Image: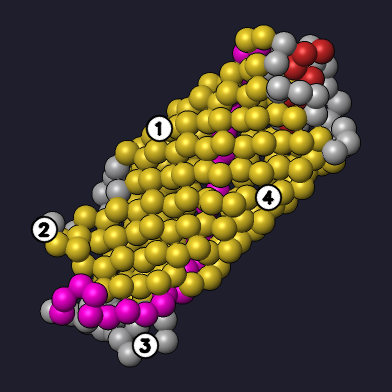
Amino acid sequence: MDIKNGLLYSTVIGVALSGFSIAALAGTQDIMFANNQAGIHVSSQDVDYGETYQGVLLDTENGKVPGFGLSASVMKNLWLGNDYLQVQYDHADGKTDYVGSYSGGTYGSLVAQSGAKLNDFSMRYGKGYVVSNSLMITPYGELGYHKWDRNVGDGIPGGYMEQYIHKYYGVGLMGQYSPVSKLVLTANAMIGHTFGTYFSADLPPPDAFSADLGTSVIYKAGIAADFAITRAVHVNMSADYTRWD
């Protein structure tokens, strides 16, 4: 079975506190403030999921799932100079639109909604390089964890629970540009690999089973904007795309 799963964190809006004491070059001060903050955000995850077997589409899950998250980052001269550390947790809970069939049926013959709970955790470490007074680039490494609790056909006869888990590692590049005072624009891209994958289906015996899902390449890309209302209070918006098989 081929499983293709793409997640678009379509809307992320947050408020952050930047209260760290930093020493920065005058031209990059806004970028440094943006990289030294802790905050909370609300989000919407756009799930785009499909299963195929021997090239035949079996079922899909699509929909926007609301959620929230916590994040913290710091950029300081710790080991290499302009060391960047960032951790983030996201949780989403809602419904997706299921299209599939009963066993032996034809795709599209069964339409329902599924419950979806998604939990994501990531951690980055990198080093920032000042390119100009308003531009910084930061290569980084990233480790992460993803869990999806899928209530297939929630509330219909034959509905059941599935669980998908994987971890991943990757390398990426973050570019930050401050076109005007108090505003920082960010773009980042990462490529990596999944590992520690796990799948389970909570079906009545003897049909319940679990399996290793195998590994795949994982891609992430995102854009963000940070505006400093004051030195200590920032507002953030971002959009991120993640895909793996």
Q: Nearer the viewer, residue 64 or 166?
A: 64
Q: Residue at x 30, y 48 (%)?
A: 245
- Expressed as whole percent of the image width and height from the top left, the position of residue 175 reads 58, 23
Residue extent of the magenta highlight:
105-130
Among the 4 quarters of the image, the one containing residue 16: top right
Q: Earlier in the sequence, mark 4 or mark 2?
A: 4
Q: Are marks 4 and 2 in contact (CB under 8 Å)?
A: no
Q: Nearer the viewer, residue 175 or 199?
A: 175
* Residue bearing the label numbered 1: 191
* Residue bearing the label numbered 4: 13
Q: Is residue 223 left or right of residue 77?
A: left
Q: Amino acid at mark 2?
A: Gln
The answer to whether 34 is drawn above or below residue 67 in the figure is above
Q: Earlier in the sequence, mark 2 or mark 3?
A: 2
Give the Cα distance between marks 1 and 4. 25 Å
Give the Cα distance between marks 2 and 3. 27 Å
Q: Earlier in the sequence, mark 4 or mark 3?
A: 4
* Residue bearing the label numbered 2: 54
- In the image, which is nearer the foreground, mark 1 or mark 4? 4
The answer to whether 136 is drawn above or below residue 145 in the figure is above
Badge 4 marks a residue whose secondary structure is: strand
Q: Is residue 160 left or right of residue 72?
A: left
Q: Amino acid at mark 3?
A: Ile
Among the 4 quarters of the image, the one containing residue 47: bottom left
* Residue bearing the label numbered 3: 156
Q: Is residue 240 left or right of residue 25?
A: left
Give the Cα distance between marks 4 and 2. 40 Å
Q: Amino acid at mark 4?
A: Ile
Give the Cα distance between marks 3 and 1. 39 Å
Q: Amino acid at mark 1?
A: Ile
